[in-house]
Amino acid sequence: MHVLNRDEGESTSNGASIPAISGMFPIGVRGHGIGSLMISIAIVCKLTQEYEDEWRLKAYQTIMAAYNKKRLEYEERLAAAQVQEGVEIGGNNPLLNRTIEREELKKGCITLWTGFKYNAVPGITHNINANAPSNYPEIHVDNALEMTQEIQFLEQSFDWKNMTYEFYPYYWGRKKYWLDIYPIKDNDPLFADFLRAGAARVLVPVRIEATKAVLFYQLTGKMWPGGDVPQFDPPDPSGTIVAPGVEDNTDAEFKLYKEYVAELRNESMIGDINEDIVIAPDDPEAWMFKVPTTLVWLQSDMELPDLEAGATEDDEDNA
């Protein structure tokens, strides 16, 4: 910060350096008995890794939301155009078919990964033999709360909306049903592939904030209690952490888990958020990003007016 003081033909300049800070930076100016005062402030801003990662996530979510909206609008316009042309597709709406496909594949993924059989305790009690109103269905609070944590983990740890999948031919299924499956047809060719599929390949991304919890569940089959990611030393993990069922895992699974944890800790997203980031001007991975401002430029140039004591800017314009 430099302060230029003009008093009776003399000028002085005082400079002051301020250490790096973050957040709001208040600036105040006070003068007494000064004929003319000019203050020049230069601020160098550096983006922290924490806010860059946050911006990337928000930008990704915004882009995907806009993409899904545009895709839905396109499919609606396409369906309307086909109806106007007299080519109305029979059967279910293709959007409904995609929902059915995703729900069934999602159920299969959860079963294969967790062994969950969907034989949960009933969350609704219903005594059909009683008289009204005792026979009305009611929520079984204890049973419902018992499944809450696991349901939340499985539904929110994965980005199910961005799940991608590919269907494999009928012959990967049970042979005794080949003659029944092969002739299946549908006006929606993608849904026909789903009905005739003998197997499927599914790719589901894990949400970044749930990476640790998913890794822990992969090894132990238990919910992650929070805190730092535990390290296990096979074949006897009891020296570091005790988790039910962990003794059933093989040494290879422990090794793979520890490799995942090491990779996770080396990711820049969990590095030092206060570390300075040096971006070279010729870095091919760098890009310019314009930030809008609410400031209004009221002059045609960047020069500050040089006014005498007691004079105004209008006086100089009329001189």
Image (cartoon, rainbow, N blue to C red):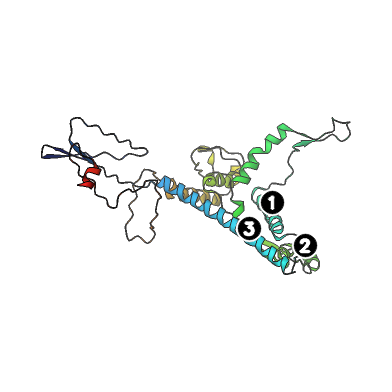
Q: Quadrant of residue 162?
A: bottom right
Q: Which residue is mark 3?
A: 72
The label on residue 20 is none
Q: Which quarter of the rendered picture does the N terminus lie within?
A: top left
Q: CA distance from mark 3 to mark 1?
A: 24 Å
| Residue 139 x, y percent position in the rendering | 75, 34
Amino acid at the residue labelled 1: Lys
The label on residue 91 is 2
Residue 290 shown left or right of residue 317 in the figure: right
Q: Is residue 159 visible?
A: yes
| Residue 174 x, y percent position in the rendering | 76, 63
The label on residue 107 is 1
| Residue 94 x, y percent position in the rendering | 70, 61
In the displayed structure, would residue 8 be above or below residue 177?
A: above
Residue sitting at the far front: 318
Q: Which of the two discs, 1 and 2, labels the residue nearer the N terminus?
A: 2
